[in-house]
Image (cartoon, rainbow, N blue to C red):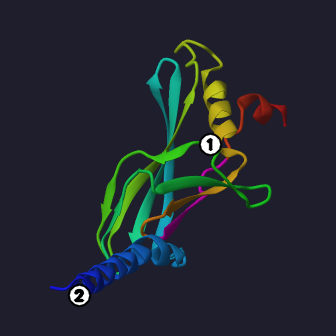
Amino acid sequence: MSDKVLISIAAVILVAIGAVSYYEYGYRRQEPWNPGGITASYLGAELREADPGNASLLLSYELQNNTDTDYRLSDGPGVVVMSRLAADGSLSSQEGVQLSYSTFLPARQRARVTLEMRRSFNWPASNDPATQEKLKDFINQRLSAVNDFVLFDQSDRVQIEFPRGWQEFKLASAATAN
């Protein structure tokens, strides 16, 4: 083959590689977010002692896949969970929320997931009369400013809204003062 033919073939290959790269890393990233493909319903909250110096606040949700495509949800570099602040609706990543475990969500099916917030917390002794108040205060501090949580899966352009369902826990001293 002549040099011109080889150069032409190489140019075609480079253009093809460039087009595939553009689609994978440029064009796909421009697709809009899909906020309704997967919806979440609040189930409940649980506070667990991770170890003597840390607590995990677990928020459980049921996800509904409203699409015809299976979806794998896992914590990773392309998945971001943010808090939507109650004060002004802005998004915040200050709370450090993450998925507790990976989930496979088949098309048109439901699955349960848990969001986890881990914080340092000195667990009160079991005989401490203020144990309940300390636990309620810890939970309220984590959730009082949050309206809901939003998960963004950057690779699949999926946006999942995790709505507020929790109630603020009333401290015993405030309840008896009324």
Q: Is residue 154 left or right of residue 165?
A: left
Which amino acid type corresponds to the residue marked 2 in the rendered image? Val
What residue do we see at 43% from left, 66% from top?
155
Residue farthest to the right? 178
What residue do we see at 38% from left, 57% from top?
112
Of circles 2 and 1, the one toward us is 2
Decide which of 146, 21 is in the foreground and name it: 21
Q: Secondary structure at mark 2?
A: helix
Q: Is residue 71 above or below residue 125?
A: below
Which amino acid type corresponds to the residue marked 1 in the rendered image? Glu
Whether residue 61 appears in magenta in the rendering, the answer is no
Per the rendering, the mark at residue 5 is 2
Whether residue 160 appears in magenta in the rendering, the answer is yes
Question: In the rendered image, which quarter contains the N terminus?
Answer: bottom left
Question: In the rendered image, which quarter contains the C terminus?
Answer: top right
Determine which residue is flagged by label 1.
95
Q: Is residue 51 left or right of residue 178?
A: left
What residue do we see at 66% from left, 27% from top?
133
Give the residues in magenta: 157-167
Q: Is residue 174 left or right of residue 55?
A: right
Residue 137 in sight: yes
Q: Earlier in the sequence, mark 2 or mark 1?
A: 2
